[in-house]
Image (cartoon, grey):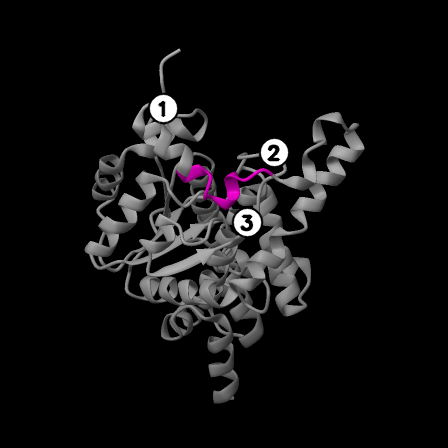
Amino acid sequence: MSLPSDHSSELLLELNTIVSEGQNPQTLDIDLLPSEAILRKLNDEDQKVAPAIREIIPAIAKAVDAIVDAFAKGGRLIYIGAGTSGRLGVLDAAECPPTFSVEPGQVVGIIAGGERAIQKAVEGAEDNAAMAIEDLQNHQLKSDDVLVGIAASGRTPYVVSALNYARAQGCVTVGISCSPNSAVLNAADIQLAAVVGPEALTGSTRMKSGTAQKLVLNMLSTASMIRSGKVYRNLMVDVNASNDKLKARAVRIVMQATECTELEAVEALAQSEHSAKLAILMLLTGKTASEGKALLDNNKGFLRSAVQEVEGDA
């Protein structure tokens, strides 16, 4: 057996300082327990996630404000990460077009190792700092973009490199980590430290840390879309009706927003080229599709503002 290298010894010392890599004293007997007791232990640990997120809401709000400003200037929200963190970013980005009808390029997910890393680990990808810069260049990173670096440990060289490069390009940068005072956080303008403590299984950061990261990503994208006019009341009025379920959901949304009948909703959607937002505006104001489009354009896509404009003119 070969002796450990200086690098591996340094890495071991570093891991000893990372909160998410610690050994959880509450689950030391988890390998001795029956199924239900194991699940209760896991659930007990999951209870710690939401309170940890609540602690950093003011910082998340700063990130949302930056993303909204970026969208207004034609910029993008770009997630970047490795392993589980990268997959979570790719997932959140992929869900934005069908949910909010944004162009696929407005929210981007980049994972170390490329698309094949979504399903299989790519050896050495998370340690490749140069690859992060190359990936951002391939995505034509611009100063109007917001880059969100995601790393549970907070040490991932690929993510730290991406954040440093993005800051040098003039981007607003956001770091998400489950370990305080980490390199990822120190490299970011806005620091989101969701400290949920050691995992039930030591180092398995797809668990509490993964849940925490997913919650933060949900908040970043959803709140930014709400602030960008993609929601009326609490309805997804910009839903992209691309399959039967989403078409039925669009009908239901129009009915909920206007208290109209199913037939009236279907007819309005047909006249509005299946835009729930436009159909709602037509039903609430009596405007034609072309008049409604002009109203929405004048109000930057905000349905409530468009309705209030018509009501104010009445």
Would you name the residue on which mark 1 appears? 123
Would you name the residue on which mark 2 appears? 201
User: Label 3 neighbourhood size at 10 Å, few (<14), some (14-19), many (20+)?
Assistant: many
Would you name the residue on which mark 3 appears? 212
Locate residue 203 relative to residue 158 in the image: left or right: right
Name the spot of residue 156 as percent of width and height, x first: 36, 40
| Mark 1 vs mark 3, CA separation in Å | 25 Å
Query: Considering the image in quadrants, where does the N terminus appear?
Result: top left
Near-viewer residue (7 or 99): 7
User: Label 2 neighbourhood size at 10 Å, few (<14), some (14-19), many (20+)?
Assistant: some
Secondary structure of the residue carrying numbered label 3: helix
Q: Does 202 appear above or below 147?
A: above
Q: Amino acid at mark 2?
A: Leu
Q: Amino acid at mark 3?
A: Ala
Locate residue 131 relative to residue 86 in the image: left or right: left
Q: Residue at x 48, y 68 (%)?
A: 58
Give the label, 2 or 1, closer to the camera: 2
- Marks 1/3 in contact by CB < 8 Å: the verdict is no
Q: Does 275 appear above or below 104?
A: below
Q: Is residue 266 visible?
A: no
Name the spot of residue 87 as percent of width and height, x first: 45, 37
Q: Earlier in the sequence, mark 1 or mark 3?
A: 1
Locate residue 257 relative to residue 230 in the image: left or right: right
Q: Amino acid at mark 1?
A: Glu
Magenta stretch?
14-23
